[in-house]
Image (spheres, rainbow, N blue to C red):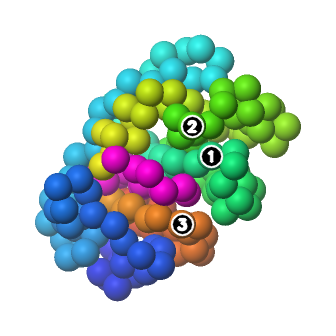
Amino acid sequence: MASPIDRRRFGRRLLTLAGGAALPGLLAGCGRREEAPDVPYTLLDGRPAQLSGLRSRVVLVNFWATSCAPCVQEMPGLVATWRRFRDRGYETLAVAMKHDPPALVARFAEIHALPFDVVIDNTGAIARAFGDVRATPTTVVIDRRGAVAARHEGAPDFARLHRLIDELLAEPA
């Protein structure tokens, strides 16, 4: 398990969950983590799903938009991260913000051959459930038990993100 300093360095800035509660375990390095919201969503191909369906996997939820330059720039890194860890129990869920036109999201996903699940949050319900996410990119990492292990606004430091994912994949489900 990494030291609390390593976890704090996941990104440039750690955020808090709705209500101002700091992420337990992330800042303290121990203790219970906040449960991730169990949101329903619909994939680009029309299949319905629920976040709890990914339990037992480490999940990266990335809030993004096609109009967000940092989001577009980080996408190849998210694809590489998914490819690196997918066979070990890792999943990525790319959540396009409600202001992003669905046709642009679908076109982006197709042109860039995004290999992971893409969702359009057309009502904003997913962003609200995750603490009213408004800034893109915002990344939330969820452990195998369905708890939030890290949250970051802005493009991640992929080396640190990979260390965190390695640690979480080593934890029991």
Q: Residue at x 23, y 53 (%)?
A: 18
Q: Is residue 54 visible?
A: no
Q: Considering the numbered disc 1 on the image, is that residue within a helix, a strand or a loop? A: loop
Q: Count every numbered label the image shows and give the total.
A: 3
Left or right: where 53 falls relative to 32? right
| Residue displayed at 31% across by 39% down | 129
The numbered dot on residue 154 is: 3
What amino acid is found at the position of numbered circle 1 in the picture? Ala
Magenta-highlighted residues: 132-148
Would residue 70 be seen by someone viewing this image from the given angle? yes
Which residue is at the far right?
111
Which of pointers 1 and 2 indicates the residue nearer the eye? 2
Labelled pair 1, 2 in contact (Cβ < 8 Å): yes
Under circle 3, the secondary element is loop
* Callout 3 amino acid: Gly
Please, is residue 75 above or below residue 155 in the view? above
Main SS of the magenta segment? loop
What residue does disc 1 label?
65
Q: Is residue 109 left or right of residue 95?
A: right
Q: Nearer the viewer, residue 37 or 66?
A: 66
Labels 3 and 2 touching (C-beta < 8 A): no
Q: Is residue 2 left or right of residue 116?
A: left
Q: Which mark is residue 121?
A: none
Q: Report helix, strand or loop for mark 2.
A: loop
Name the residue rendered at 31%, 54% in the picture. 148
Residue in front for this viewpoint, 10 or 2:
10
Q: Position of residue 118 (x, y in %)?
A: 61, 34
- The residue labelled by disc 2 is 99
Q: Quadrant of residue 164?
A: bottom left
